[in-house]
Image: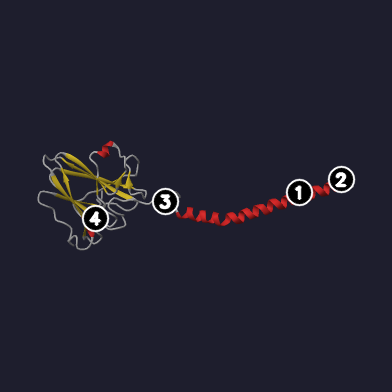
Amino acid sequence: MKKIGWLFLGLSAGFLLTFGFLWSGSVQNAQAGPAGANRSEAVTATLSDEGGPAATPVFAGGSDEVPPANSEAGNLPSAPLPTPKPGETLVYFVPADSDATATVLYLYNTDSVAHVVALRGFNYNGVLGYSLDINIAASSFLRLASDSIVAAPPPSWATPAPLITNFTDFTYLASLSLPKGVKVEGYTVFDPGTGTVDPRQDQGAIPLRFSTDPATLFMPLVKNP
């Protein structure tokens, strides 16, 4: 009889303890539910498509989604594509300057005198939308970039400092008027939404193609063997 009493007492104590644990857990879940939901929504709102924290892009001269300031109506004339200046070579290229890309240009002046290089950008129907005259000293080198450069670039990028030229993704075609002795090269890079070019990292450079005729630039001639 005494054993039955101890058994009944043990079962009762176990039941009470189990009920207490279950009740305590349900209260904690009810209290944590709304806060947990809020935290989940907050994290979801700050995640990028790549699964990492979304960064706010900072662009030199404005966002790539906003036309350049000098492309507003009335600031630049609506004109067809330019004609070559006497003694200069007019070349065309297609820049890439969206939130995910940037364009880098190199200008070399092999001449013994300084020159002015005319850089022009055009929108989808050939209307002038971007204009920049670039002074390049005699026997010198100049780098241009369509996005800002990291605060601590490699020494080779620090001097001379790159000239920032924000094409934005409204520039579909660009031209350079190259005086005698001025050479050009360039490439586009993948910019992971930061608006900053980091020369210390591999951002997937793709060489630009330059042409003296926009038609062959957009539709290269294919020669049969």
Tell me the number on the disc at residue 14: 1
- Of pointers 1 and 3, the one earlier in the residue sequence: 1
- What kind of residue is marked 4? Leu
- Of pointers 3 and 4, the one earlier in the residue sequence: 3
Q: Position of residue 161 (x, y in %)?
A: 24, 42
- What kind of residue is marked 3? Ala
Tell me the number on the disc at residue 3: 2
Q: Disc 1 versus disc 3: distance between alpha carbons?
A: 51 Å
- Of pointers 1 and 4, the one earlier in the residue sequence: 1
Q: Are marks 2 and 4 in contact (CB under 8 Å)?
A: no
**Residue marked by disc 3:** 54
User: Which of labels 3 and 4 is toward the front?
Assistant: 3
Residue at 72%, 50% in the rendered image: 18
- Of pointers 3 and 2, the one earlier in the residue sequence: 2
Query: How many numbered circles does the render carry?
Result: 4
- What kind of residue is marked 1? Gly
Q: Secondary structure at mark 3?
A: loop
Q: Disc 1 versus disc 4: distance between alpha carbons?
A: 80 Å
